[in-house]
Image: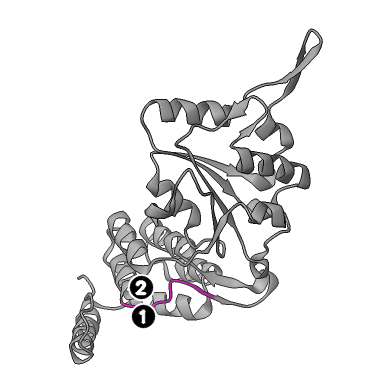
Amino acid sequence: MKQLFSPDVPILLIGAPGVGKTARVQAHFDHAEVVLTSTLVEEDIAGLPYREGEYDYRTIPAIFRRLHDASGAGKSTVLFLDELDKARRSVADTLLTLVASRRVGNASLPDNTCIVAAANPPEFGGGDGISDAMLSRFSAIDYVPDVCEWSDWADKQFVAPEAKRVIASVRNGELAIFDMVGDGLSKRITTPRTLTMALRSLERNGLDSDAFDTVVRGLLTPASASQIMHLVTQTKSDVLSHSVANARHGIAQGKSRSVLRL
């Protein structure tokens, strides 16, 4: 996806919460200014007004100063507008000026700074902050989590054998990297974010059956939670049998499959 990021064309990533939009953007740039647009007020982007004599001016917001400092140091830079769909109308109007002209008042973006935004679809609580005028200035891309990329990243983060088994199951396509069931506060979503949180709980707190089971079932869909509880409570002989079965299945299908690590 890195080749898509260019100062010439703003990119809008559309996807469910927790699928890795922010993490993906941060991983590709030396310096990322991540702006949660749902919390902004107009002055955060346009600067605070002040008067000198007969004239009115605006201060330069810290966001712009940090981007210029990073760009001047030779770093790749991005302005990441998170939750663009939830921006207040006055903020959205100011952001439209910024996206269209790369400047607001006396503040401007460095020439090599990319503009990337993220939004949730309506079924995931997306707001109405993106007007047609704003949308027409972005290349809108449906963002789908990358199984291999997340698995490779997670493999470097977690060392517990039980965590390794979960990661391998995701890599092999046995454990969904994205799933959703329920409505309202009963909704449970399996995403790279919730899977990562489950693995962090596992490594930090161990396999206290009651506590870990409760946490996992609060984070993930019932199917994902049950799969993980089965994986982390497997004995070594169970894991070996499972790994051999996976390898044989892959050979039979003419595919190369990653075996579970012991």
The answer to whether residue 60 shows anywhere in this view is: yes
- Above or below, 136 against 188 in this view is above
**Residue sitting nearer the eye, 180 or 15:** 15
Give the structural element (helix, strand or loop) at label 1.
Answer: loop
Q: Residue furthest bottom?
A: 252
Given residues 216 and 137, the one toward you in this image is 137
Residue type (three-letter) at the residue carrying disc 1: Glu
Residues shaded magenta: 172-179
- Residue that numbered label 2 is attached to: 170
Residue 160 place in picture, x, y as percent? 28, 62
Can the viewer see residue 61 in this picture? no
Mark 2: secondary structure = helix
Count neighbours of disc 2 (C-alpha within 10 A) and say few if under 14, some if 14 to 19, many if 20 or more.
some
User: Would residue 136 be found to the left or right of residue 229 on screen?
Assistant: right
Question: Where does label 1 land, which residue?
Answer: 174
Check contact, mark 2 vs mark 1: CB within 8 A: yes
Which image quarter: residue 169? bottom left
Location of residue 21 with respect to 65 vertically, above or below:
below
* Image location of residue 148, percent across then percent down: 32, 67
Q: Position of residue 142 (x, y in %)?
A: 53, 66
Q: At 48% from the left edge and 27% from the top edge, which residue is drawn?
A: 68
Q: Residue at x 48, y 43 (%)?
A: 7
Where residue 129 sits, quadrant-wise, is bottom right
Residue 242 falls within the magenta-colored stretch = no
- Give me the residue at 24% from left, 79% from top: 239
Classify mark 1: residues with Cα within 10 Å, few (<14), some (14-19) or many (20+). Answer: few
- The x, y position of residue 74, in whole percent, is 36, 30
Query: Quadrant where the N terminus lies?
Result: bottom left
Q: Is residue 174 magenta?
A: yes
